Image (tube, grey):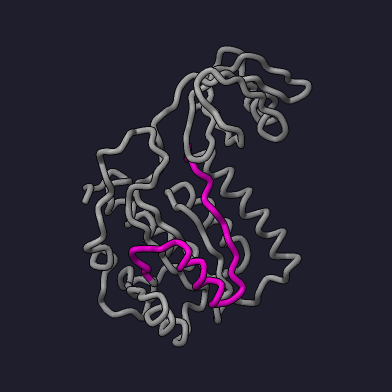
Amino acid sequence: MMPRAFVNQPLKPGVTLTLAGPEGHHFARVLRVRVGEQVALVVTGQGYLARVEAVDGKCGEVICRVQAAIPSHEPRVQVYILQGLAKGDKLDFVLQHGTETGAAGFCVFASARSVGKLQPNKALSRQTRWERITLEAASQSQRDRIPSVHYADDWQQACQWVYSLHPQRVICLDEQASAVSLAEALQNLPAPKTDCEPCSTTFIGPVVVLAVGPEGGWDDQERQKFVEQLTAVSVTLGPRILRTESAGLVALAAVMYHFGELGGADV
């Protein structure tokens, strides 16, 4: 697998870039890249092929020369996960595997049945941890974007986050939902465009939000708010009850398959 790094400066063919800090250390001392080896550099959703020109293992620096833009690895559909705050390392699991599966972003929401809320000082450190998890997962899975991660301390903040995405569909996963399937909830959404440039960094598909409750699920007031304030469609994933850390991932994979992003039939 080609080494991959996310960078902050503009890139184009012919530009020389020095990787230092954590990325340089990882390339030089962990991956031990060599002169002449090809690597991928990613900025603002666009990947570039680059050649290693020099390696300083002592300082942990690698000099690369950009060669050409490469086709995007990003899904054409944007799927965001609104995840109820859960205990232990369950959120780490959701963030890691959700990133690998193609989620565009996450919002961790302290819902009514979440066990406690994060104190401000702990929320900041947890946010830093979550961002590190998505960065590592995005690099490992050859993503061209690092999914955003937010924390909502109450319903109003979660609602504002959803509004900011301008989604075409909000889907609330609920074990008490009527017999509406996920496939039915995805009907009539616009199909992703297929005539764009392969290296385009512009999203060309619909925006979908998946809402997943914590261990105790949603309470009745939240169910009502999802419908009244977010025009959400409540769906069931079948007769089996899924854990909070697996429900969103199952739904995410199903949405990706529906839109042809996991080898499924392109709608």
Residue at 33% x, 47% y: name it: 204
Residue at 49% x, 55% y: name it: 105
Q: For residue 64: magenta?
A: no
Nearest the eye: 76 or 200:
200
Q: Position of residue 97 (x, y in %)?
A: 49, 51
Nearest the eye: 92 or 164:
164
Q: Is residue 69 above or below residue 45?
A: above
Toward the bottom, the furthest residue is 220
Q: Which residues are magenta?
A: 142-171
Q: For residue 166: magenta?
A: yes
Residue at 65% x, 74% y: name it: 117
Q: Is residue 164 above or below residue 261?
A: below
What count of labels does the image hold? 0
Q: Is residue 170 above or below residue 61?
A: below
Q: Position of residue 151 (x, y in %)?
A: 60, 65
Residue 95 shown left or right of residue 74 in the figure: right
Where on the picture, by quarter, is residue 8?
top right
Q: Position of residue 217 (x, y in %)?
A: 47, 77
Q: Position of residue 187 (x, y in %)?
A: 22, 63
Nearest the eye: 168 or 252:
168
Residue at 68% x, 70% y: name it: 118
Toward the right, the furthest residue is 58
Q: Is residue 70 above or below residue 214?
A: above
